[in-house]
Image (spheres, grey):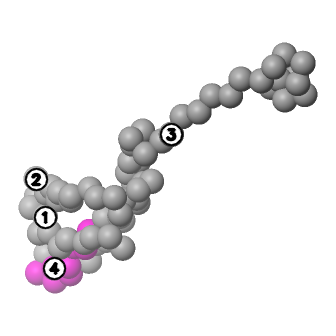
Amino acid sequence: MIDQKIVDVAADGATASFKVSDAWRPGAYVVAFVHRPLDAKASRMPGRAVGVAHAQIDAAEKTVGSRSTFPSGSSRAARSTSA
């Protein structure tokens, strides 16, 4: 677990914000759990809901590119051109 928050949710919804850090790399799952307590006066049973979403973190700044060139007669060039 990287972070957690407890938020009261009004009838029109709620928003929770989190600071994204390197601990999130290469991505993190965000899980939301909502609980509605028992309301005996309204004859309403408790309610629960769970949501899961994946937060992909852009790894472009941490990616190193490379390119290799082989002579046309080498076996590596033959393998790479046939692929």
Which disc, if any, is residue 39?
4
Amino acid tagged 1: Val
Considering the whole magenta stretch, tell me its main secondary structure. loop
Q: CA distance from mark 3 to mark 4?
A: 57 Å
Seen from the viewer's position, the closer of residues 65 and 42 is 65
Quadrant of the rendering where the N terminus is positioned? bottom left
- The mark that comes first in sequence, 3 or 1, is 1
Q: CA distance from mark 3 to mark 2?
A: 45 Å
Amino acid tagged 4: Asp
Tell me which residue sits at (38%, 48%) in the image: 57
- The mark that comes first in sequence, 1 or 4, is 1
Quadrant of the rendering where the C terminus is positioned? top right
Give the residues in magenta: 34-41
Tell me which residue sits at (83%, 23%) in the image: 77
Is 67 situated left or right of 16 in this image?
right
Is 16 situated left or right of 32 in this image?
left
Let me know if residue 35 is in the magenta part: yes
Q: Which residue has dot 1 on it? A: 9
Q: Position of residue 82 (x, y in %)?
A: 86, 21
Q: How many marks?
A: 4
Secondary structure state at the residue bearing disc 1: loop
- The mark that comes first in sequence, 3 or 4, is 4
Q: CA distance from mark 1 to mark 4?
A: 16 Å
Q: Which residue has dot 2 on it? A: 12
Is 51 situated left or right of 43 in this image?
right
Q: Is residue 51 visible?
A: no
Q: CA distance from mark 4 to mark 2?
A: 19 Å
Amino acid tagged 3: Val
Q: Are marks 3 and 1 in contact (CB under 8 Å)?
A: no
Which disc, if any, is residue 64?
3
